[in-house]
Amino acid sequence: DGGITQSPKYLFRKEGQNVTLSCEQNLNHDAMYWYRQDPGQGLRLIYYSQIVNDFQKGDIAEGYSVSREKKESFPLTVTSAQKNPTAFYLCASSIRRLSEAFFGQGTRLTVV
Amino acid sequence: EDQVTQSPEALRLQEGESSSLNCSYTVSGLRGLFWYRQDPGKGPEFLFTLYSAGEEKEKERLKATLTKKESFLHITAPKPEDSATYLCAVDGNTGKLIFGQGTTLQVKP
């Protein structure tokens, strides 16, 4: 089945540690996105990529980093510089711009 | 700056009581407007795409409409299984998909 897979579903991290969230899609989509969702707030864009080896900062990129070495994969690293990393992280992909985005099931990150 | 505002934040309906959710947007050039449904603890599920004013799309009890300044998601005779958070997003000239805060709908039997 085609789809977009995020792992792990739940992640716990100690303060001061970097952590990488995985996002893989087998839909042959060019564009991929990372969003953060906090309670009572909409989705806020962290990074997006419209093609392999290229990505742009979204509205809240500080403390995060990404790579896009393969079309299928768009991992997100939450660094120790991110001041409030506890949140629900969502990855999405779309075949191209102006087409609907499909979302993964999310990773809930908790800093302990 | 592109902006999306959804209202109301929360809506409680009795089963069968029709209503509408609003999505107001400000973008430099609308390329597309998207509606999603999100269940608790899950990723959003795509519902509709609208590209130009006057366009309408329907799916079961849901109907989405678009004007130059806003979009409405009309829910006709809702059922408890329609309870969810409904998200609106726009794609403007920036190439980014910008989301509103969402409307949380609760339908009571």
Image: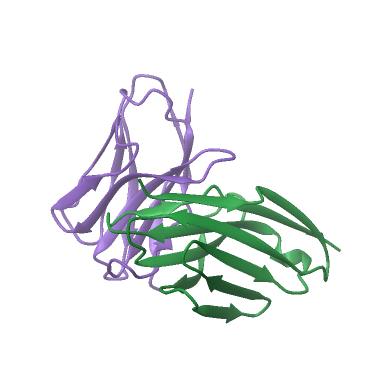
Chain colours: A purple, B green
Q: How many marks?
A: 0
Classify A84 as above or below B93.
above
The reply to whether residue A109 is visible in this rendering is: no
**Residue sitting nearer the eye, B67 or B21:** B67
Residue drawn where x is 51% and y is 65% of the image: B35
As drawn, which residue projects farthest toward the top? A16
As drawn, which residue projects farthest toward the left? A53
As drawn, which residue projects farthest toward the front? B68
Relative horizontal placement of residue B41, taking residue B11 as reference (left or right): left
Image location (x, y in percent) of residue B85? 62, 55
**Quadrant into which the N terminus of chain A falls:** bottom left
**Residue sitting nearer the eye, B96 or A36:** B96
Classify B87 as above or below A22.
below
Image location (x, y in percent) of residue A46? 34, 42
Image location (x, y in percent) of residue B98? 40, 52
Relative horizontal placement of residue A50, taking residue B26 as reference (left or right): left
Classify A6 as above or below B30.
above
Image location (x, y in percent) of residue A42? 51, 46
Residue drawn where x is 15% and y is 52% of the image: A54
Relative horizontal placement of residue B24, taking residue B84 as reference (left or right): left
Task: Classify residue A85 by image quadrant.
Answer: top left
The reply to whether residue A100 is visible in this rendering is: yes
Residue drawn where x is 61% and y is 75% of the image: B63
**Residue sitting nearer the eye, B6 or B12:** B6
